[in-house]
Amino acid sequence: MKQLSFSIIVPVFNRPQEIEELLESLSNQDFEEDFEVLIIEDGSSIPCKDVIEKFQSKLRLQYHTKENSGPGGSRNFGMDKAQGNYYIFLDSDVILPKQYLSEVSKKLKSTYTDAFGGSDAARSKFTILQKAINYSMTSYLTTGGLRGHKKGVGKFQPRSFNMGISREVFEKTQGFSKMRVGEDIDLIFRLWEFGFETQYIENAYVYHKRRSTLKQFFNQTYSFGEARPILNRKYPSTSKMTYWFPSIFIVGLDVSIVLAIFGELTLFSCYYLYFLVLIIDASFKNGIRVGALSVITTITQFLGYGLGFITSQFNLKN
C-alpha cells in the first residue's frame, strides 16, 4: 500500500463558531505526518472566513466558497480540490480528541480498507441535552449500536460525520449522490457494490455536539427516517424489518397509553420497564439528570424517525 496522505474535508453552512472549535482540535493533533484541511463554505450567509484566517499559520488549509448544494455536493467539491489520497469527512459540529488522526493512520496501516468509519461520544463539557441526545443516538438500547460499536447490529455503515474513503473509491463511485439526507449510506452501498471494504475503527471517535434543541433533533431524525425508504427502494437487498422499529415503537406506545386508560396495563408495563432500564443505564454512564432526559430524547428520536419513515414510505407508494 502506498503512503497515506490525508485530506480532511468539512462542509459548513452558517456555523463559524463550530468550525473554530473543530480547527482548534485539528491543530492540537499528536499526528506527526502532514495533512491538509479543506473547509467548503456551502452557500453560507454567515461565512467563517475570519475564523479560517486564525488558523492559517497552524494548519495547511484550503478555504473554498460555493453555491449551496448540500453536504454531499460540498464533499465532492472538496475531493476534487484535495491533494491527498485518502479523504476524511467530518461534520462542522465535531471536536477531535488529539489522538484521532494517529489512531486512523495506525489502523489503516495495519489493516487497510478503502473506507472506514468511527463513532461519536459526548464530551464532559457538553450540556445535559447534548449528552442525552448522544446517548439516544448511540446506545444499544436505542439503536442497537448501529452507529459504531464492535458488536453493533449488522454490517457497519460509516456515517459522514466521521468517515473516510480512498481516492480510488471516489474515482470509481464519483462520490456522494445528490441526495440531501442519506447520501453517506448511499455511497457506502455503492462502494460495497464495487467490491470495496469498510471497517469500524474503535479508537477513531469524535466528540459530536449535535443539535442544541429538541426541535432540531426531531427535524434531524425525521430526515433520517425519510431517507431510509428511498434507500430501501434503491437497494432492495439492504432493506430490513428493523428499520420499521421506531414507527412500531411509537404506535405501540400510543396504544399502551390508551389501553392503560381503560385499565389494561400489560403493554404499558413493558414500556415502563424499558424506560426504567434505559434511565438506569443512561444514569450509570452520564448521571441521573442525563438519565431522566434520555427518556425524552429517545422518544423524540423514535417519533422523528418513525414519522419520517412512514411518511416517506407512504409517498413512495403514491
Image (cartoon, grey):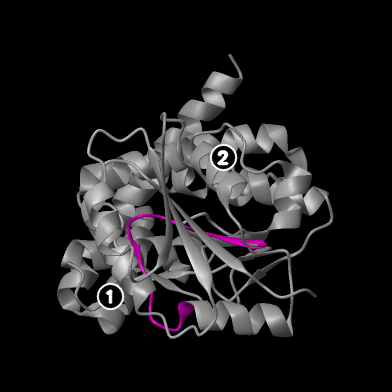
The numbered mark, 1 or 2, whose residue comes first in the sequence reads 1
Residue 194 against residue 201 in the figure, above or below: above
Query: Where is mark 2, residue-wise?
Result: 228
SS at circle 1: loop
Q: Amino acid at mark 2?
A: Arg
- In the rendered structure, the answer to whether residue 253 lies left or right of residue 248 reads left
The quadrant holding residue 190 is: top right
Q: Quadrant of the C terminus?
A: top right
Residue 244 against residue 87 in the figure, above or below: above
In the image, the segment drawn in magenta is 85-100
Residue visible at 73% across and 64% down in the picture: 114
Locate residue 166, reporting x and y percent.
Answer: 69, 60
Residue visible at 28% across and 75% down in the picture: 123
Is residue 203 visible in this depiction of the protein? no
Query: Is residue 188 part of the magenta span, yes or no?
Result: no
Locate residue 266, reporting x and y percent.
Answer: 37, 57
Locate residue 130, reporting x and y percent.
Answer: 24, 63
- In the rendered structure, the answer to whether residue 21 lies left or right of residue 155 reads left
Locate residue 185, reporting x and y percent.
Answer: 61, 48
- For the residues labelled 1 and 2, the Cα–Cα distance comes to 29 Å
Q: Which residue appears farthest toward the top when viewing the image? A: 318
